[in-house]
Amino acid sequence: MLEVSGFNFTFDETKCLECGGKCCIGESGYIFVTLNEIRQIAEFMQMDFESFCLKFIKKVGYKYSLIEKKMQNGIGYACIFFDEETKQCKIYQKRPNQCIKFPFWEDYREDFNVLLKECIGVVKK
Ligand code: SF4
């Protein structure tokens, strides 16, 4: 069980195996990435930085986000790197910090019930 100081829930990572990637799909949103993370993912994918950005990155104000795609089943969106067949992240080893920190996001600090709809691995303390 993972715990982070200041959050009133714990997280069991083993539940990710049976979840099907709910945190990578759903409503349209942003998966923010730093320039350093973009560089690392591009390298992981054996792409040059510019080609990678043109294909997978969108600018959001002064930030950058991975793009998303429409789900094959027509219901909602998925991160461009979510594999709908295997239900796995294609860049898991280099996934952005935003993904690594899930479900310990500020938005969920006070809103456990919203998180519970998205993640079967959390338990209120
Ligand atoms: S980068 Fe990977 S873990 Fe993060 S939202 Fe996309 S598919 Fe999910």
Image (cartoon, rainbow, N blue to C red):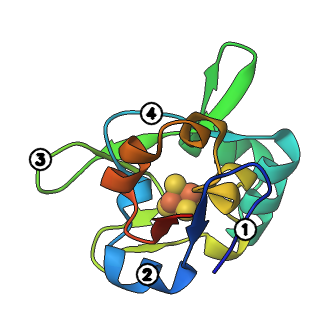
Mark 2 vs mark 3: give the one in front. Answer: 2
Does the beta carbon of the residue at mark 3 sit less than 8 Å from ligand 1? no
Indicate the secondary structure of the residue bearing disc 1. Answer: helix
The residue positioned 53% from the left and 34% from the top of the image is 30
| Marks 2/4: CA–CA distance | 23 Å
- Viewer-nearest residue: 71 or 15: 15
Q: From the image, tell me which residue sits under label 2.
A: 15
Query: Residues under labels 3 and 4: Cα distance?
Result: 16 Å
Q: Which residue position holds label 3?
A: 74
Ranked by sequence position, the earlier of labels 2 and 4 is: 2
The answer to which of marks 2 and 3 sits earlier in the sequence is: 2
Label 1 – label 3 distance at C-alpha:
28 Å
Label 4, residues with CA under 10 Å away: few <14, some 14-19, many ≥20: some
Q: Amino acid at mark 3?
A: Gly
Where does the image place residue 48, in percent across and percent down from the top left?
A: 77, 54
Cα separation, mark 1 vs mark 4, equals: 20 Å
Which residue is the site of mark 4? Answer: 29
Element type where label 2 sits in the image: helix
Q: Are marks 2 and 4 in contact (CB under 8 Å)?
A: no
Q: What's the mark number on residue 109?
A: none
